[in-house]
Amino acid sequence: MPGLRQPINLIGGDVPTPGDPLMEPDDSQPYGPARWVLPTAVLALLIWPLSLAWVPTSGHGPDWVSTLVSVAEIGAVLLAMVAYGLGLRAHRMEGNTKSSDLGMRLASLVVLLAIGGKLLSQALVE
């Protein structure tokens, strides 16, 4: 149309116009808080096994083992709580996404495993 400026393409090829699928946002990947739910929950799940370091020593290990167990339990539960909170925030802002839903389930699993491990350690040590 006369009077309208066309975008200049310095690279070559077609320039995407508004309404072109190349200009539309990619909804296949989560964004905002939903983007961080699953990685945070996976990190909590990876840290959680360190809280079982007391098992080989059965409560008679060096002091650093009890410190490692405490730090791992607290860290895993805190990361799981952060992941769950991010999942709730993502659900309120963006609706459910597969990755945020899976992240919230993994976060719940980490909390249950940490509490179960703590109860098991108390039962076995005494």
Image (cartoon, rainbow, N blue to C red):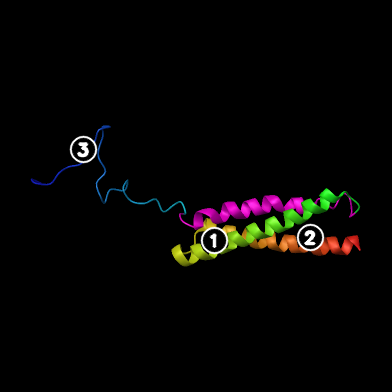
Magenta stretch, residue numbers: 31-59
Crowding at mark 1 (Cα within 10 Å: few <14, some 14-19, many 20+): many
The residue pinned by badge 2 equals 117
Amino acid type, mark 1: Leu
Give yes or no for contact between labels 3 and 1 (Cβ–Cβ under 8 Å).
Answer: no
Q: Main secondary structure of the magenta part?
A: helix
Residue 99, horizontal then vertical, whole percent: 53, 56
Q: Residue at 63% of width from left, 52% of height from top? A: 42
Q: Mark 2 or mark 3, which has the lower sequence index?
A: 3
Amino acid type, mark 3: Ile
Residue 50, horizontal then vertical, whole percent: 75, 50
Q: CA distance from mark 3 to mark 1?
A: 41 Å
Q: CA distance from mark 1 to mark 2?
A: 25 Å
Q: Residue at 62% of width from left, 62% of height from top? A: 81
The one nearer the camera, 88 or 60, is: 60
The residue pinned by badge 3 equals 8
Question: Residue extending furthest left?
Answer: 2
Q: CA distance from mark 2 to mark 3?
A: 62 Å
Give yes or no for contact between labels 1 and 2 (Cβ–Cβ under 8 Å).
Answer: no
Q: Secondary structure at mark 1?
A: helix
Amino acid type, mark 2: Gly
Q: Residue at 54% of width from left, 62% of height from top? A: 87
Q: Is residue 122 left or right of residue 73?
A: right
Crowding at mark 2 (Cα within 10 Å: few <14, some 14-19, many 20+): some
**Quarter the C terminus occupies:** bottom right
Q: Secondary structure at mark 2?
A: helix
The residue pinned by badge 1 equals 86
Q: Mark 1 or mark 2, which has the lower sequence index?
A: 1
Q: Residue at 64% of width from left, 51% of height from top? A: 43
